[in-house]
């Protein structure tokens, strides 16, 4: 395995007078296994590495990358980044990150068994998951797929301002998509469990979740339309919270693409809602001691008791606003530059269990899945309208399943209408944790 820090230093060490250089170096290995009807339908095991280089000369930024760590390709990428900087427009806020004295959290995110577990054992996990789902309920007809996946990744950011950060992490998951049916219909449901290591995977949890979500939707019909409280299951709540967090990016705010622009200190959500972004929390599979500019991760409070407390900054947007980075730089791979954004977001859990929230809501809808969330939510206006399916709740008890309806409101209104926050904080692969959320006054459009 290559020494990523040394590779980065070899590039940065070539900085000329009046030139800033940043090297972003990555090594990654992924496994993906898909099983269908006790046979391997697809298997991919891939290893990749690369480097992204930024050169800043006279407030002009040049970017290039190489999809390999071979010396000749790295030299080509450096020369190309320098050449690109000559033709770029001047930007007074351009530059690399400088050390800010914040100490990085000590995180243990690497588990060796992901690399040492034989592929045959990983295949058997996916096959056993398929068998386990089918055994849960006689109404499970088949599985669309049963899947195992894992990621092992190392990264380094080195720049000419003195930053030299290194990160490594592993995680894996089991995921099943079940089909339950009767003579007249078929319904679907998914189940997942993720872990830092193969040994920590809970196959039984994933199987039970897939079977329950598929079978409880049998007999679903369209609901009547009206204004109701909706209860979002953790995975659905995480999707909503991810959208909220993305609108708190300083870049979105500066470009006028956020409903929260210019509203620091305002009450923008229910007092029950405290939203934090904390990549130093090892429970997140997106956790990391450093951001993608090499600055230390830190806990950023975005909403506290419903009050807007802050935005997420990288070094560029921080310079534009005359402030400091919040350690929130992210980038979409070696070919891209950084932008600020959420890295590990969660709403602080409340005291109520999901069962208590159901009982107190009384007459409402439990939302199990949604569709069209990326196209159905406008981050500028806050308009929210997505397809949904779930369970009708009557008198605090789960009643009949419902499907083919939409739920709509406004993102700002939904935050203010949060009625309860669950204690069931749930971590999946991705940058947002979920928990049960009850939201009042949501339009349900069915029949």
Image: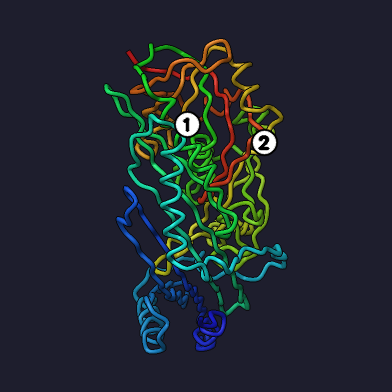
Colour convention: rainbow
Is residue 298 something one can see in this rendering?
A: yes
Residue closest to the far left: 184
Q: Which residue is drawn at 55% across and 46% down?
A: 432
* Quadrant into which the C terminus falls: top left
Q: Which residue is drawn at 39% across and 79% down?
A: 68
> On residue 387, which mark appears?
none
Q: Is mark 2 on a helix, strand or loop?
A: loop
Q: What element carries label 1?
A: helix
* Residue that badge 1 annotates: 212
Q: Residue at x 50, y 78 (%)?
A: 21
> On residue 349, which mark appears?
2
Q: Distance between the residues labelled 2 and 1?
A: 24 Å
Q: How crowded is mark 2: few (under 14 residues within 10 Å), some or many (20 or more)?
A: many
Location of residue 288 in the rendering, given as x and y in whole percent from the top left corner: 60, 61
Instruction: Check the image and report above or below for 55 versus 33.
Output: below
Q: Which of marks 2 and 1 is nearer the N terminus?
A: 1
Of tags 2 and 1, the one toward the viewer is 1
């Amino acid at each position: 395995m290559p020494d990523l820090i040394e590779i980065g230093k070899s590039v940065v060490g070539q900085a000329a007078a009046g030139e800033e250089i940043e090297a972003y170096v990555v090594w990654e290995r992924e496994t993906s296994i898909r099983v269908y009807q006790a046979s391997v339908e697809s298997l991919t095991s891939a290893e990749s590495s690369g480097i992204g280089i930024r050169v800043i000369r006279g407030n002009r930024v040049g970017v290039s990358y190489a999809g390999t760590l071979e010396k000749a390709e790295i030299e080509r990428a450096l020369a190309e980044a320098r050449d690109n900087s000559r033709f770029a427009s001047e930007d007074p806020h351009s530059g690399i990150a400088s050390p800010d004295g914040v100490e990085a959290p000590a995180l243990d995110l690497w588990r060796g068994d992901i690399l040492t577990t034989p592929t045959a054992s990983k295949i058997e996990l996916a096959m056993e998951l398929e068998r386990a789902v089918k055994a849960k309920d006689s109404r499970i007809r088949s599985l669309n797929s049963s899947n195992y996946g894992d990621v092992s990744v190392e990264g380094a950011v080195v720049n000419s301002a003195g930053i030299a950060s290194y990160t490594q992490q592993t995680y894996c998951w089991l995921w099943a998509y079940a089909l339950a049916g009767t003579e007249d219909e078929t319904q679907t449901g998914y189940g997942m469990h993720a872990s830092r290591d193969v040994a920590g995977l809970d196959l039984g949890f994933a199987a039970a979740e897939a079977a329950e979500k598929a079978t409880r939707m049998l007999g679903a019909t369209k609901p009547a339309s009206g204004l109701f409280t909706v209860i979002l299951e953790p995975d659905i709540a995480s999707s909503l919270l991810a959208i909220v967090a993305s609108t708190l990016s300083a870049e979105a705010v500066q470009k006028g693409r956020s409903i929260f622009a210019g509203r620091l200190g305002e009450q923008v959500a229910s007092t029950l809602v405290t939203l934090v972004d904390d990549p130093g929390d090892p429970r997140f599979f997106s956790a990391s001691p450093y951001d993608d500019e090499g600055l230390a991760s830190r806990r950023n409070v975005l909403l506290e008791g419903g009050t807007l407390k802050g935005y997420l900054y990288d070094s560029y947007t921080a310079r534009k606003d005359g402030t400091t980075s919040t350690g929130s730089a992210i980038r979409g791979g070696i070919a891209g530059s950084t932008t600020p954004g959420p890295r590990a977001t969660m709403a602080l859990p409340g005291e109520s269990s999901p069962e208590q929230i159901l009982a107190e809501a009384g007459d409402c809808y439990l939302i199990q899945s949604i569709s069209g969330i990326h196209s159905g939510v406008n981050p500028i206006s806050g308009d929210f309208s997505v397809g949904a399916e779930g369970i009708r709740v009557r008198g605090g008890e789960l009643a009949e399943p419902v499907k083919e309806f939409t739920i709509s409101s406004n993102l700002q209104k939904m935050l203010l209408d949060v009625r309860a926050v669950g204690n069931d904080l749930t971590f999946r692969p991705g940058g947002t944790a979920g928990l049960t959320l009850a939201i009042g006054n949501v339009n349900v459009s069915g029949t």
